[in-house]
Amino acid sequence: MKVEACRFDIRKIGEHTLFFCSLLCMSLLSVSCGEQTREKVTVDFNQRDGVNASTDSTLRGPALRVAVASMISPRETFSSYQELMEYLSRGIGLPTEFKQRKSYAETNQLLAQGQVDVAFICSGAYISAKAAGEIELLAVPLSRGRPYYRAYIITHKQSGIQSFEDFRGRSFAFTDPLSHTGYAYALMRLREIGASTNDYFSDSFFTYAHDNSILLVDKQLVHGATIDGLIYDYYARFEPDRVRNVKILERSVEYGIPPVIIPTNTAESMKRRLRDILFSMHESEEGKAILDKLLIDRFVEGRDSDYDGIRDVRRLIGK
């Protein structure tokens, strides 16, 4: 089976399709109803995400344009990062325009077109954008004291699946074509066992958010998925019901953590201001509280060499 795009209209998963779509819509609505209006943040979902953009009447003139890749679904991402955006806004002295797109490639396109001043992107997307010469590392988060993360291969606790090899003839969810933990890692595992998506899984598709993949596994609408371990760990700590029925089959080796990046033409003065704000966040009570909610210890200077392991995987799978 070929890999098919799947953007909140999950298709070709048999009789459970309508149930999943309804469930996902209810999930997004429940998050929406819990949001509160805040100042100095304008949200640009470009209308394509099925989310109405909110307008901030205080926004006049220049703004700090911040993009966050949809490692979790759009409203979940906005809810999680809203306080961080407000913190940056106050520190930099500019209103913040929050931009988000469904796919990592679309977020990279914003960078290439000069529509973003700073972005929080996944590691795989960083490799692609760096190769194109569009961006540079601004900072990386430390999680549990380390600038690394892992891919998790997951299944439902009642699936009977005990290893990656048991997915033969079963359905499997990927996250995004540029995702390392949500795609490239699984392709490497397939290569290791002499298989490919075309002849191994009964069906495979992209969900375009790690939490969507977790939800599909939790509701037994797909047999397995490859996900960002940071997202799983976040839910395990703050919303354990989301992963209560999910089993981790394997954890990958460590790879460079999703970074904060800026365009290569960013002024040195702006670069210093952004770094000063991020690097000192953990020293203030407010900043530390925001970071704790994101399972981030602090931000530090990043090293491009930390992403060589991901580059090695890309070369191995020919991506």
Image (cartoon, helix red, strand yellow):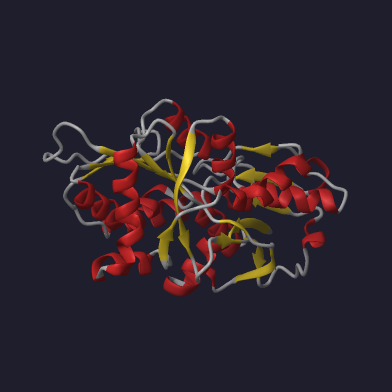
Quadrant including the N terminus: top right
In this rendering, position of residue 77 left or right of residue 157: left
As displayed, is residue 144 above or below residue 37? below
User: What residue do we see at 49% from left, 31% from top?
Assistant: 134
**For the view shown, which residue lies furthest in the top direction?**
113
User: What residue do we see at 68% from left, 59% from top?
Assistant: 223
Q: Is residue 44 visible?
A: no
Q: Quadrant of residue 11?
A: top right
Q: Quadrant of residue 278?
A: bottom left
The spot of residue 151 in percent (x, y) is: 63, 59
Quadrant including the C terminus: top right
As displayed, is residue 1 above or below residue 265? below
As displayed, is residue 138 above or below residue 23? above
Closer to the camera in the image, 190 or 115: 115
The spot of residue 139 in percent (x, y) is: 44, 52
The spot of residue 198 in percent (x, y) is: 79, 40
User: What residue do we see at 28% from left, 64% from top?
Assistant: 287
